[in-house]
Amino acid sequence: MSKVKKTIKVIKINADLCNGCRACEVICSAFHASPKYSVNNPARARIRVVFDPVKNIYVPVYAGGYMAAECMGRDKYLIDGKEYEECAFCRSACPSRDAFKEPDSGLPLKCDMCEDDPPQEEPLCVQWCLADALTYEEREEEVDEELELDDMETGLRALADKYGFQNIVDAVARMSQKDEI
Amino acid sequence: MRYAETGYNLEIDLSTGNIEKVETDPKLTELHLGGLGTNAKIMWDRVPPEIEPFSPDNLLIFSSGLLGGTPAPAANRTIVTTISPQTRLVAFSMMGGFFAPELKFAGYDKVIIRGKSPGLVYLWIKDDEVEIRDASHLQGKGSLETSELIKQELNEPKAQVASIGLAGENRVYFSSIEHSRSSASRGGLGAVMGDKKLKAIAVRGTKDINIARPEEFIKLCNEVLQYIQWRADNPIKHVPPILAGLGSPQEMAIHDEEWHTTAFSWGNARYRRKDFWTEEVEKEWTKVQEGAVERLISCYNCPMKCGAVISYPSQELSKYMMKCYSKLTYVMGAMADDLEFGFRIAGLAQAYGVDGFSAPQVMAFAVELYENGILTDEDMPDFPADNEGRFFYLLEKIVRREGIGDVLANGVYWAARQIGKGAEEYDHNTIKKHEQIPIKLGMLNPIFFLLLATGEKINITQIEGQLPQAPFPNPEDRKEFVKDWIQAPSDRIKEFFLKWEPRGEYSFPFYPDFQTACELVEWQETMHYIDDALGLCAGLSSFPIKPPYHINNLPQIISAATGLDIDRDELWNKIIKRNRNLIRAANVRRGLRRKDDKPPQDHWRKRFPEHEAKLLDEYYKFKGWNKEGIPTKETLEGLGIGYVGEDLEKRGIYNEQSEEND
């Protein structure tokens, strides 16, 4: 496999500065709506703020990869005497919870760093975080070239995991006969 | 498709258990926007004056605003409306936090509660599924504890909960509805909730809110955020630090309490302590506050950090949340001198769910009656000798309605009349039967006179705003202030400010002229009514000086969000006037008259009865009201709500003989 230059985009999360306003969820869901900004719904956001004021817990977490199966066990973190809920820091859309899934289709969501044309200076959540809990950094790295699944393929893969590959193929065939697509 | 709003209300009848999802008429949005505007319309239509506050037919409305839950920063207020048991008028207190946006995401603009449940219940709304659930196990639980327990039993950590504490359950006339770090606390709304036996409402929503003109709208939202950032670096000069920035006064971040402690009154709104704030006090209070505040926190989609997580080991839960001035109201009411006491008692009071303005005033009033022999040891057995102990004692009695607490739980006005023996003399800081912020000043301020006298929110911080509270002595500073005053409604207002002096010809009470005073007052009031219809926080709009939302950009913001084309004239002179007059008329129907339009009796030392009467006359005329402060038939017809005037006429209200003018 050949090496390629890749820009690594990093959102630095300073949980101590998070004020729990969830503006990141708001603007994320608005930006990813179609047409852009036409709809707003934090349940569709690719970032969520895990927060529990009574325990003084505030953690912004981004949607990462999709997982077909849930983990064998669950974890809890104890940091500075505070117990963080199961899977609090996990970025995956997985069968064990409803985080990072489209509320109506159940399809997984993933942070794309607000890819846009022309490109945004920073992901929108960073732009809207006036508390500076979220800041943005870029760096160059040499990595192995690799094919990335696009959104549709990720979605199809999730559906195939859920319903079986053959059922998906059958359904697509039926739908195309009925001229639904 | 409906934009910004969901187009649905949830109608709940607690007597029958009936739950209905009702589509609303889009025409009403054009006429009243949403929030307080449409609440006022519902109250007018469905709650005639014969209905008592504790009647099953009284409504309790939890409403989002028209912009609530959209990306517009700080559009998060929940506007709660009902008939107040204390004032017997329409009460419309509000709270920040996360409740209103969540309600919108569940698919509803409002929850309208009627009837009375036989047993204690709570309401659980999850998108289309709505359920009335038993709450008998939550009886007597603190407000925050209730919300934690409900989230746990539903296994819904993202649910938002509004709840009452023991005070609401016991129908204390100044009990609050608590949610997160916020509370809808003015007017005793919690008592109506308790009377309906509704312990809490929990909501979780996962639906969309649509925006009509997305590109334009988001651009305007970005401008708001940029202005907030600019203002953070450019505080207003020549005003106290607490008023220099945006948001609700930044009480949790700022330690300098010179302004509150020396300008406001202590005890039963009696004593100014101009030399209270010393270096020693500042050092001690800073230490206490830094020890108590764990984190500064915000409401939904707002960058301001007006609230804080407070950690105090003596609380029901180890932590609670606080904002603004409630850390001081108990301290100053009790003459306690000790900020630590403030944090301790405020946490407990919040758990019980009482209003942080009224409760300390009522308790200070009781202490004064005791010290003057009107209340005795017979009324207050085992009454402690120390100020702090007395306040804890009274709080426990009031929220349980135990002994004298049962009388005090009705607030200063009613308690004074129940106690008699001259107690009425000590009721000197209420307006329309409602306790006020304890401010006692020297010279009559004609602008605040009108705001205090005629404002039906009956709470000065929710009536005034945007105008510096005092003139800048140096003319050059005024010029500089006016240069980038994009929020000003007109050049006339700028001219007023440029000429305004602390002393001489251009000073209070005879400056400004009547017309300008009326314009200033209406502008400030209008801004609050806009916020309350949109669900915007006053902290980024109607309250602070030079806020990011103002009369000159809001019409565009509303239009882009909703697709309605509303210009400034339509917004101010039609919609907001309509809403304002609807509230006024609903209260007139409940007996509100000119005699009730008064500031607290000794708010200023120097009063000018003739000038004040003339101010009121001119303001009524300016508003299109008659000499009794009643909107005329013509005014109401001109606003397209002629049916309101017909109702007032049918009730014979226009034919009454005025007591004062005869």
Image (cartoon, helix red, strand yellow):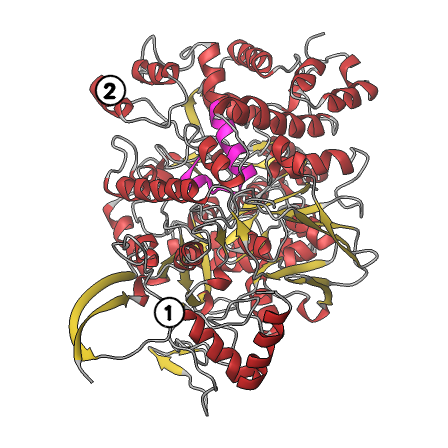
Specify the quadrant of the image occupied by residue A176.
bottom right
Is residue B528 inside the magenta stretch? Answer: yes
Query: Is B249 rendered above or below residue B463?
Result: below
Q: Residue A62 bears which disc, if any? A: 1
The residue lying toward the viewer, choosing from B103 and B375, is B103
* Image spot of residue B298 (x, y percent): 41, 54
Asked which secondary structure carries label 1, the reply is strand
The residue positioned 16% from the left and 80% from the top of the image is A3
Residue B515 visible in the snapshot: yes
- The alpha-carbon separation of the residues under discs 1 and 2 comes to 48 Å
Query: Is B44 rendered above or below residue B637?
Result: below
Q: Residue B399 bears which disc, if any? A: none
Label 1: chain letter: A
Does mark 2 fall on the same chain as mark 1?
Answer: no
Q: How many other residues sit within 10 Å of disc 2, few (<14), some (14-19) or many (≥20)?
A: some
* Image spot of residue B242 (x, y percent): 33, 40
Is residue B515 inside the magenta stretch? Answer: no
Mark 1 vs mark 2: in front: 1
**Type of the residue with mark 1:** Tyr
Residue B248 visible in the snapshot: no
Label 2: chain letter: B
Left or right relative to B607: residue B293: left
* Image spot of residue B118 (x, y percent): 81, 60
**Type of the residue with mark 2:** Lys
Read off the residue under disc 2.
B479
Q: In which quadrant will I find the C terminus of chain B?
A: top right
Query: Is B165 rendered above or below residue A66?
Result: above
The residue positioned 41% from the left and 70% from the top of the image is A151
Q: How many other residues sit within 10 Å of disc 1, few (<14), some (14-19) or many (≥20)?
A: many
The boundaries of the magenta stretch are: B523-541
The residue positioned 73% from the left and 20% from the top of the image is B642
Specify the quadrant of the image occupied by residue B39.
top right
